Image (cartoon, rainbow, N blue to C red):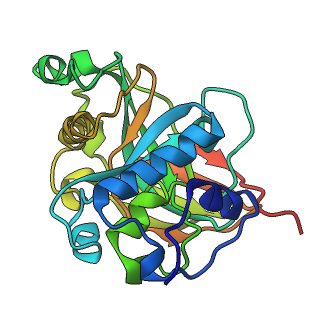
Amino acid sequence: MSEVIRPKDLIHLRHHSMRRTFAGSELPQTLEAAYDLAAGTVGLLGTRVAGWKLGATTANTRRIFATEEIYFGALLAEEVWTSTESGPLPSPPVLRGEAEIAFQLATDISPEESEAVLGSPAAEIFDAWAPAIEAPYSCVDNIIELGLRALLMDRCSAGALYLGVPRTDIDDPSIDGLLEIFADGVSVAQGSAKASLLMPPDEAALGFLKLAAAHGVYVRRGQWISTGGISPCVTLPFRTPIRLVLGGQSEFEIQVQGPIE
């Protein structure tokens, strides 16, 4: 029988841009243990959590991973890029992306404080939102076959999050506008929050905060919460212009360099 995977094993695979097939016996036995394994990788790396990516906010992800509850994974500082800040673009080994809406936390929230804080209006909990491209990546090659525990142990397939210009009006109706991804000038994916998500994006973010508190997770001011795939997740080209458009207006254009050949 295979041994259960350890945090350092996942770190090794990701560090070397490696993927492999896992046996079911290598997975943590419960969802809670899978979350703990993911947290262990973050702790061992000693890096800052800059955001969180959500799943099960769409009917498709609930079907694929056989769950009715939102799930989440941590995004590390080097995996999050904002168009208003300088810095290198995150470059996952495989580039796939989907359009999303992300919210930025306005305050620290400990598990003990969460119930009181979450009674406040969304505009007091979040101080900005931004359109984004979320780019998933997992070192687990057979993640669909293995299911939710495999997804959670690898930080919910955290790869990269590319953020547009932050807006401070949390009730801005353009949140529900058409989001579209272009690759080399060609539209490759599109969707809107109202049509794609099972709940409004801010409700998805609030649902995550309740779940995070239940798992003992301390979330911090400035972290981003990306609320799930509004467009289909599509393969994107390296070293080619990729543009995100919201409501017909360009948000940002990036070229992800990818692996060195």
**Residue at screen point 25% across, 26% down:** 111
**Residue at screen point 49% across, 53% down:** 134
**Residue 162 seen:** no
State whether residue 261 is above or below residue 104: below
Q: Residue furthest left?
A: 119
Residue 91, horizontal then vertical, whole percent: 70, 54
Q: Is residue 35 left or right of residue 200?
A: right
State whether residue 258 is above or below residue 251: below
Residue closer to the observer: 205 or 2: 2
Residue 2, horizontal then vertical, whole percent: 52, 80
Residue closer to the observer: 156 or 173: 156
**Residue at screen point 22% across, 41% down:** 211
In the rendered image, which quarter contains the C terminus? bottom right
Residue 185, horizontal then vertical, whole percent: 62, 63
Residue 43, horizontal then vertical, whole percent: 55, 38
Residue closer to the observer: 213 or 44: 44
Q: Is residue 233 left or right of residue 202?
A: right
**Residue 256 seen:** yes
**Residue at screen point 59% across, 68% down:** 139
State whether residue 12 is above or below residue 168: below
Residue closer to the observer: 81 or 18: 18
- The total of numbered circles placed on residues is 0
Q: Residue furthest front?
A: 1
